[in-house]
Image (spheres, helix red, strand yellow):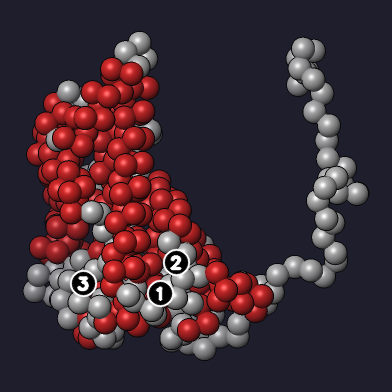
Amino acid sequence: MTRDPDLPAVPLPSLSGGSPGLAPVPPGASLSREAIEAREDRELAPFAMRVDATRGRVHDEPEHPFRTAYMRDRDRVIHAAAFRRLEYKTQVFVNHEGDSYRTRLTHTMEVSQVARTLARALRLNEDLTEAIALSHDIGHGPFGHAGEAALADLMRDHGGFEHNAHGLRNVDVLERRYASFRGLNLSYEVREAFAMHAPGDKRALGFERCRPLLEAQLVDVCDNLTYTSHDLDDGIAAGCVTPEEMREADLWGATWDGVVAEHADLPRPLQVSTAVKRVLDACVSDLLAATSARIAAAGVGAPDAVRAHPHLLVGYSDAFGRLQRALARLLHERFYRHPRLVRMAQKGRRFLREIFAAYTSDPATLDRPWKAWADEVGVPRAVCDHLASMTDRQAFEEYRRLFLPHERA
Ligand code: MG
């Protein structure tokens, strides 16, 4: 690449001597796990979960020299096959509808980014927050909430299906990466977050009844905050809703009117992204201020006090919460029930129902590993695990393989 002659040359930092003003790093001065844990102890708030207080893993493992247990949990989630498949799983738009819409994976990354920012600001455990955020949707099957509803319906008489409970099943049982145990052997607190967000009796899942840790509460609210703003963005980009019809919700209406008044000449897509960004900023700022006030008022001095507290502590102020819920409701009405989305959802449900029926009525058609799994856990649960593991396009391919005469079986 030729350099523009009008630009001044940028001096490159010297590789040998270090930049002037920065103390050179002496050899052997890298941070050990113990040093990271000590830093946590100094810097985290008293109500944050400290990694050295973890209830540990189901299978004992030696500690890592320079990663804490929660850093390892985060890394294990990223290396999981179920995590990679999030790329081809529906958030709102089925994968083949367009390459610029959010997928489960990019949604997950947005949740993680917002949650980490807030965790740092609140002096919560950022590594734990990140591990919980990156794994929070790992139990989703293909076709988003329509897919989940279809699997729940098909499994009604066989123990049910719900994405948080299935996420726990994924990280505890279904992932196979390690020689000496099934699953990812994650720390108790990451697994607990799945159980806390799953419906029904926590004790049936092996956890006590309590409030989620602040790190888990934070991810839950950030999930909601993130999809409200990015679904607005995707819904408008897809032409399913217009910025004008969303003005009925005051939070969007005031923001949109402000952006249009301020930037009348800006191209419309930039007006939209500016308004979406302002809504996101407003949500994050209110959430931070209201949560930090609520934590202070509750006087919780330790994670166990958070667990025992009668109320959730992470949330918006009352007034802002009403505005945020009104916007989410309007999105439900105008966007999630748009005929295009309803058609996608119906198609997804139909595929899952027909594949489920084909395999459960004749388990001999299951590929060998899934047939072996069916012998262990029963046919309906194994078929459900198989279906839930699929991406949107794997489910389409499976459907073609099973039902179209000219496809290879
Ligand atoms: Mg989510």
For marks 2 and 1 on the same chain, the one whose residue lies earlier in the sequence = 1
Name the residue that disc number 3 marks: 311
Residue 346 in the figure: left or right of residue 376: left
Does the beta carbon at disc 1 come under 8 Å from ligand 1?
Answer: no
Residue at horizontal 83%, vertical 40%? Answer: 13
Q: Tell me the element at label 3.
A: loop
**Residue under the point 19% across and 29% down:** 253
How many other residues sit within 10 Å of disc 2, few (<14), some (14-19) or many (≥20)? many
Question: Between marks 2 and 1, how big is the CA–CA gap?
Answer: 8 Å
The yes-or-no answer for disc 2 within 8 Å of ligand 1 is: no
Nearest to N terminus: mark 3 or mark 2: 2
Residue 68 at x, y = what percent?
57, 74
Q: Position of residue 167 (x, y in %)?
A: 32, 68
Quarter location, residue 209: bottom left
Q: Is residue 288 above or below residue 191?
A: above
- Residue that numbered label 2 is attached to: 124
Callouts 2 and 1 close, C-beta under 8 Å: yes
Residue type beneath disc 2: Leu
Q: How far apart are the two marked residues, 1 and 3, measured between alpha carbons?
A: 15 Å
Q: Which of the two labelled residues, at mark 1 and mark 3, occupies the earlier sequence position?
A: 1
Question: Residue at label 1?
Answer: 47
Q: Amino acid at mark 1?
A: Phe
Q: Which mark is on residue 147? A: none
Residue sitting nearer the eye, 30 or 202: 30
